[in-house]
Structures are given as C-alpha cells and as structure tokens.
Amino acid sequence: MRLHMEAHPDAGTQTVPIFRAHPYMITVEKQPFLTEANLEEAKLLDVVGGYSISLKFDRQGTWLLDQYTTANRGRHVAIFCQWDPKPGEKLNQGRWLMAEQISKGITDGMLVFTPDADREEAEQIVTGLSNVGKKLHSSPDSKW
C-alpha cells in the first residue's frame, strides 16, 4: 500500500489511471509519502451502500498524513495497492484504488476510503495489510 500526492507533471511524477469502469488520469509523485510500514491497523467497514477500508497509521504516519494533507488541500491523495488474491497465489501487479480530493488536513492518523475493488478484493487487501502490519510489529529490528 502506497499513498502518493497529486503533483504537477515533471521528471519526478507519473500519470496513473483511477477507477477501472470509467478511468480518469491523475499525475502523482512517483515516490509515496506513506507506506504500509507506517500502518498500525487496517479494517473493512460496512457503510451505507457498501463498504470502506479504514487505515490507522502510527505516530510517524499520523504526522506525515497531517503534514501532506494540510499542505496540499485541493489536491488528491492516490492509493496504490498490491495484494494476494487468495492464500498461496502470487502477489498481483496491483492497481490504483482511489484518489480522494483533500478538503482538510487529516490530523488523527485515520484514512477511510471506498476502494475501486469488489468486496472479496477489499477483504483480501485488509487481510494482507493486517498480516504485513503484524509482521512489521513483531520484527526484532522493528521500531515498535
């Protein structure tokens, strides 16, 4: 899972497709400003009309999310994700799950979004992110 900030086209950016059914292109920074390394928890939430993914970031991730969203109001945050389709299968090539326009700074370290994914894929994404988080948190070299 990688969060990329919308940017003006230059050598450090790439143009990516958002949404499969009716794709539109958005230019984002090549380097993510947040990754799964800063993720504390991922959940699948039932919401009116469907489901959303909730991401809770650690202290450093909360700070980065606050800094980037506060400084870039009006721009989009695009999320790219790769996941295991089913246990034992190879990691897929991944895709861009969303690009939400920032209306205000996100200061609490929580990002909730509706992914461009069916429910089964969303469950696989959340399970994969949770497993990565557990692995990172249990590592002897981990900062946790």
Image: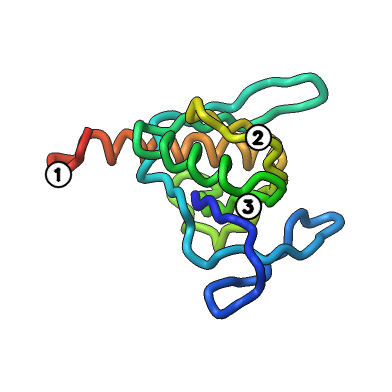
Q: Residue at x 66, y 68 (%)?
A: 8
Image coords of residue 32 (percent x, y):
48, 57
Q: Helix, strand, or loop for circle 1? A: loop
Q: Amino acid at mark 3?
A: Ala
Give the class, few, some or many, for how many residues have Cα within 10 Å of label 2's Cα (few <14, many ≥20). Answer: few
Mark linked to residue 78:
3
Quarter residue 141 falls in? top left
Tag on residue 104? 2
Mark 3 vs 1, N-terminal side: 3
Residue located beneath label 1 in the image: 141
Query: Where is residue 138, by image quadrant?
Result: top left
Mark 3 or mark 1, which is nearer to you? 3
| 2 or 3: mark nearer the eye | 2
Q: Nearer the viewer, mark 2 or mark 1?
A: 2
Q: Looking at numbered disc 2 in the image, what kind of residue is underneath it?
A: Lys
Residue shown at the point (54%, 59%) measured from the top left? 92
SS type, badge 2? loop
